[in-house]
Image: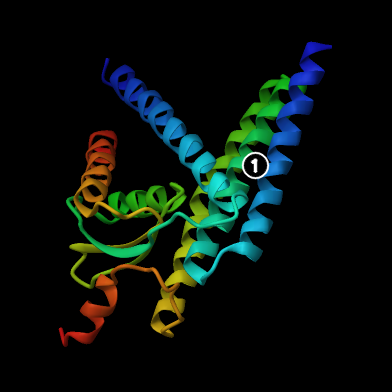
Amino acid sequence: MKILVKVWHIVEFAFFYLHRFISSNIEVAYEILTPDFGMHPAIIEVPVIVKSDHEILALVNLITMTPGTLSLDISDDKEKLYVHAMYAEDKDKFISDIKKLERKIQKLLN
Amino acid sequence: MIKEWIAIVLLALGALFILLASVGLIRLPDIYTRMHATTKAPTLGIMLMLTGLCIYFPSFPTVIKSLLILIFIFLTIPVASHMIGRSAHMMNTKKWKSTSRDDLEKSRKKPQ
């Protein structure tokens, strides 16, 4: 029973992430192909909820693979992540987006 | 017949995304935005190509190998791109003129 729930979580996460991945990839493709740039890049500090090392590795990898975000560095006490974002007009909305991904990873790995 | 056409379309789309990454590498203004283009677009391209392959040769070993390739790519590309971006920031590489804020620079200036 437990295994079934875990498999369901994995499938659900895969579909959620795939949708996000493809839609934002099309956004970046549009940015490259049109003559003027409509982006507002910034490097933003994001607080990290997850504690263990392998959760942080999963989070950083998934953030980097999402187009529009690129993780640059993590502070020494593993509490703040520095993310370069392509579309960062609204800082709070961006941080809540990453928090949503973090909660999903926590559910998946515990 | 239909199977062949689906495979052709998927392979062409994958090649298109990989071409797009190289166009982005030339066009975009600074190193960070270029990293955006060159890490994600090829991954999507490879994903589409592998899907086309799995549709054209629908056997169990093919699907397993494709999944392994995908997992390997998802584990290695982010690590490499993160190291390039981090060292570029440590060397104070020039940022694009409309970059609005830089929290990392502030934290580097403060003595811990």
Where residue A44 sits in the image (x, y, percent)?
Answer: 27, 63
Where residue B67 sits in the image (x, y, percent)?
Answer: 58, 34
Q: Is residue B26 visible?
A: yes
Q: Is residue A78 above or below residue A97?
A: below
Q: Quadrant of residue A17?
A: top left
Q: Quadrant of residue A73?
A: bottom left
Where residue B68 sits in the image (x, y, percent)?
Answer: 59, 39
What's the chain of the residue with tag 1?
Answer: B
- Left or right? Give the position of A1 relative to B88: left
The C terminus of chain A is located in which quarter? top left
Q: Between B66 and B29, which is closer to the camera in this rendering? A: B29
> What kind of residue is marked 1?
Gly
Residue ranking furthest to the top:
B1
Residue on which the image places disc 1: B45
The N terminus of chain A is located in which quarter? top left
Question: Residue sitting at 66 percent across and 29 percent down?
Answer: B51
Crowd class of label 1 (few under 14; some 14 to 19; many from 20; radius 10 Å): many
